Image (spheres, helix red, strand yellow):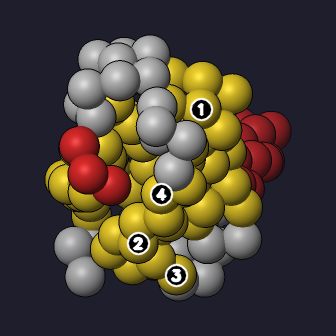
Amino acid sequence: MRDLIRRLMIGGIAFLFFAIALSACHSYHIDVTVRNNTGGPISLLEVDYPIASFGADALAAGADFHHRIQTRGSAPIKVQYTAANGHQVQITGPVLHEKQEGKIEVVLLPDGKAEFQPSLNPAL
């Protein structure tokens, strides 16, 4: 009987540690899609977000670029690229916050404009 109680206690303690470790490991991610609807190819695409950035050398007209990010702190998402006509474009979007998750689509439009379509939780 003592062995059974001891095994149950050890099993319960192990389960408790496992549950705590599992709950502490949640990682918040945002899936970002950049869609080039500018009407021409773009180059030197860079997307800045809280404490990091990502990009691509080139993005063809009508093409999508996908990247998964994790934010630290709060700051606006910023996009810059070189348009087909050689002009440098810089656009500032909504503020992203730490512990948000979900997705955001960045649709690059003609004339240096963009639409930001966030679907984030929590929506701040």
Of mark 4 and mark 1, the one earlier in the sequence is 1
User: Could you tell me how far apart the alpha carbons at marks 1 and 3 are, in whole angstroms?
Assistant: 24 Å
Determine the secondary structure under disc 4: strand
- Is residue 117 visible from the viewing direction of this image? yes
**Residue at image coords 53%, 83%:** 74
Residue 77 located left or right of residue 50: left
Determine the secondary structure under disc 2: strand
Viewer-proximal residue, 51 or 4? 51
Viewer-proximal residue, 72 or 51? 51
Q: Residue 75 carries which label?
A: 3
> Which amino acid type is shown beneath numbered disc 3?
Ala
Q: Disc 2 marks which residue?
A: 92
**In the rendered view, would you say 82 is above or below 43?**
below
Which of pointers 2 and 4 indicates the residue nearer the eye?
A: 4
Which of pointers 4 and 3 indicates the residue nearer the eye?
A: 4
**Residue at image coords 35%, 69%:** 93
Determine the secondary structure under disc 1: strand
Q: Disc 4 marks which residue?
A: 89
**Residue at image coords 61%, 72%:** 50
Which of pointers 2 and 1 indicates the residue nearer the eye?
A: 1
- Residue 102: % across, % down: 32, 49
> For residue 33, what is the image quadrant?
top left
Residue 28 located left or right of residue 35: right
